[in-house]
Image: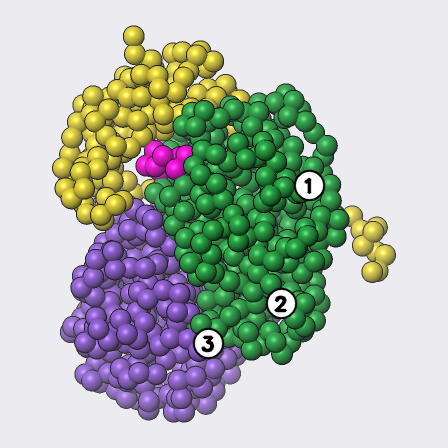
Amino acid sequence: MGKRVGIIGVGQTHHAAKRLDASGTELIAEAVSRALDDAQLTIKDIDAIVVGNMDHFENINYVDMWAVDGLGACMKPVFKVTTGGTTGTTVGACGYYHVASGLFDVVMAVGWEKNSESDTQAAISTCANPTLERDPFAGAIGPLATEYSMYMKAFGATEEDAAMVAARDRNNALRNPYAHSRQEVTVEDVLNSPMLSYPIKFLDMCPRSDGSCAVIFACEEKAKKLCPRPAWVHASVVRHDYTHFGDLEWKFMPTLERASAAAYKLAGITNPLKEFDVAELYLPASTCGVKWMDSLWFCEHGGAPALIRKGTFEMDGELPINPSGGVISTNPIGATALIRIGEGAWQIMGRAGERQVEGAKKALCTGFGGCSWSDVMILGADLP
Amino acid sequence: MSDWKNDVEIMVHEGKISVPYSWTVGSTLSRFYCELRDNGKIWANRCPKCGTTFVPPKIKCINCYEEPHDWVELPGTGTVETYTVVRYEEPSMHPRKAPFVYGVIKMDGADTGMVHFIDEVAPEDVKVGMRVEAVLEDEREGNILDIKHFRPIG
Amino acid sequence: MEKVAIIGVGFTKYAQNSPLTFAEMVFEATTKALEDAGITRDEVDNVVSVSSDFWDGRTISSMAISDASGAFGKDITTVEGDGTFGALYGMMRILSGAFGVSIVCAHHKGTESNMNGITNCAFDPLVERKLGLDAVSSAALQARRYMSKYGLLEEQFALVSVKNHGNAKRNPIALLPMDITVDDVMNSRKVADPLKVLDCSPVTDGACTLILAAERQAKKLTTNKKRVWMKGVGHCADAFRPGDRDLADTRALKAAAKRAYDMAGISDPLNEIDFAEVYDAFSYMEPLWLEGLGICDDGKGCEYLERGWFDAGGRFPVNVSGGRLSGHPVQSAGLYAMAEAVLQLRGEAGERQLDGAETALVHGVNGMCGQSHCVWVLGK
């Protein structure tokens, strides 16, 4: 069997709409240096590196090769993994498997994006099949708007429910010095913001950011030696079941249901709402923060609005979600899902600063992307 | 296999990904290009730990991961380490018409080489080990093409 | 450590302007690999696809093949790079204990894309890309550096092309089986000196799939004859800019090979390994990489090539398949090379079967001028 793996260091850039002061590799170096500092290591202690982003956002082919200077990867094993929006969790999982395999002891996983360098929606549109869906079904907002309008119709969820999620995440970001968008907003502000694609409004939707995140994974022996309180990886599961948007199930979120069910089984979780202390979820729009709560098994289908109205997922609620401010506050796409893992790890390690959930022992982290795909990673303070 | 596959007209749809890009140059290369544009100088930077001197300058030393914060001006001369005569046309990529010569120039005062054009010499006369110097454009914009090419010395 | 076996291989015939979409090519290769292993999709628990948004001309290109690769309901991920790196990740995922059987699939439809433009995008947009550098012109710089460092001749590189195109005549999937002479290579159209057309691999379409299994699964699912063990693997990257490194120095490959040999318990690769599939996108690369792989001393690759060491009947046969020079689907090239080694080790390589093939060396490359390498030792 493989080795047990712990996260021993996390670093991220100060994310922004446009980081004019740093090139792509400089952004990567900033995250890498901070992760090394966090783990109190030097680059010599890193045995292998994994990196990921989305090619057409910066138009750089073979990013793993181009990024060698920033990664500190010269004369080290390095390769690239990429799966669209889920790239960050894909990179994190790859770092995890590097160590769990027993082939490497200390591995750094790096996600980055400089979304300011291109037209994000123009690049995303090319993910759809060029001879079938590229022309009619372009961009990221359309599919998300479509699924929430279906959910509202099916279960009586409202635009206000989504606005409450948006206000929660955006206000949480005020306590995160790394967050890109840090503005105090009310539910009314969200509801009054410009409509992008019904029912999603401007303040419901994620921005695009420049940023990078690096997470250091270590085998059990090293993790225990190097870190007072590692965040142990209890499960990593991925479901990327769809190729065509036309094939999707809209009423619930099938890949998240399947991925989280499998991950809970691996981690021995039977009552996720009770057993998790904190969650960092890849919610690209506040609407997902409503509908997808069903699919994480926090409640029956259609039960999410009631939980949200009760404040279940607020900082002082039963299960705080996105203390960092989440994706609608910060979204350097190739790093976005890795930031979920990094923030989850910091919560377990007790290093989350002002946004710390006291005594967090079990964290749920997710990634979203592609054709409504889901990744899940579960972290814990106890050895798995 | 069903035989309709032998008869069907196989279609090909043409497409092009056209996305505009603007790459942030970053502080290190910005300094390099500002010096080149404004003062016509080629600058390198050096790792304080291992002493390796890089041109174009690096954000991090590739050996030590230290910031190479010592900056040095190079004389702009060097030696041809390798070259090729490019014979094919790629008008959208190549700033000049084939045949033209690319070389890796090991720069005097630095430990790394620069890839650039070698010109003002017949392609068949370019040799490995040849001494060359940078020729700058008169009107410079702050990019690598501010160096027009390298030419033989003397 | 648990062992991992390759229990099935499948691939499409190398093609140009294939009438199939790349997803259809992946489906064909994966179906064949499952048939070869004698298993169904139900026995597979995870998929590693290898694809590239650049070469595929779409973003999240892995989305295009997730159904074709059989990934529905399974854990799937995507490596962007050469197929050998995808196989490495497939192996890691099994060694982690999380999975028992991996599909690793790679595809490449070179004839749908512009090779020069796409490889130009592998260079720094702030520096070398503006000069118009691409895979071919940068390789030419490497070839010239290799020649001048060791006093080698273009005619010696031409021998690689003669050998590999000749080998391709015995490989039914090869794109360019040819009887050619050194003069033919020397007189072929100049592309970027010292490289001529016949020094360069062809733009190719092709998909290849391997099925990997943990030892416990492999023994349950297949017969002994079908199993080829992944005995050693190593990968390593060198510096990025062509001017950052001595282009004729193979230190990253040496480091990758050392990892692979240490893991496989090999101390004398020339004598302990029987044959190799080496990355020969350009003729000069074969001797250069053989030096990095420790098969001969630095600068000696061409000398042994001339002596016939690397011929199909030679002391250490290299690229008996015809190599990348006879078919080079970039992203899947490394998986094809691994599949070829598997067929040889199983004794199923037909006309090109080598006698007594027990241990194979396979080599894949990422990036320009061999910036990063992945080295495999496979064995019976």
Q: Residue at x 44, y 39 (%)?
A: C297
Image colour for chain B is yellow
Residue A213: within the magenta? no
The magenta segment is: C241-249
Residue C227 badge: 2
Q: Nearer the viewer, mark 1 or mark 3?
A: 1
Percent position of residue B117, x then y? 39, 22
* Front residue (pair B36, A174): B36
Q: CA distance from mark 1 to mark 2?
A: 25 Å
Q: Main secondary structure of the magenta part?
A: loop
Disc nearer the start of the sequence (1/2): 1
Dot 2: what SS? loop
Dot 1: what SS? helix
Percent position of residue A327, x then y? 33, 67
- At label 1, the amino acid type is Asn
- At label 2, the amino acid type is Arg
> Disc 2: which chain?
C
Q: CA distance from mark 3 to mark 2?
A: 19 Å
Asked where in the image residue C208 lies, by quadrant, the reply is bottom right
Dot 3: what SS? loop
Image vertical order of residue A21 relative to residue C247, above or below: below
Disc nearer the start of the sequence (1/3): 3
Are tags 1 and 2 found on a single chain?
yes
Report the residue marked by disc 3: C97
Asked where in the image residue C195 lies, by quadrant, the reply is top right
Residue A103 appearing in the image: yes
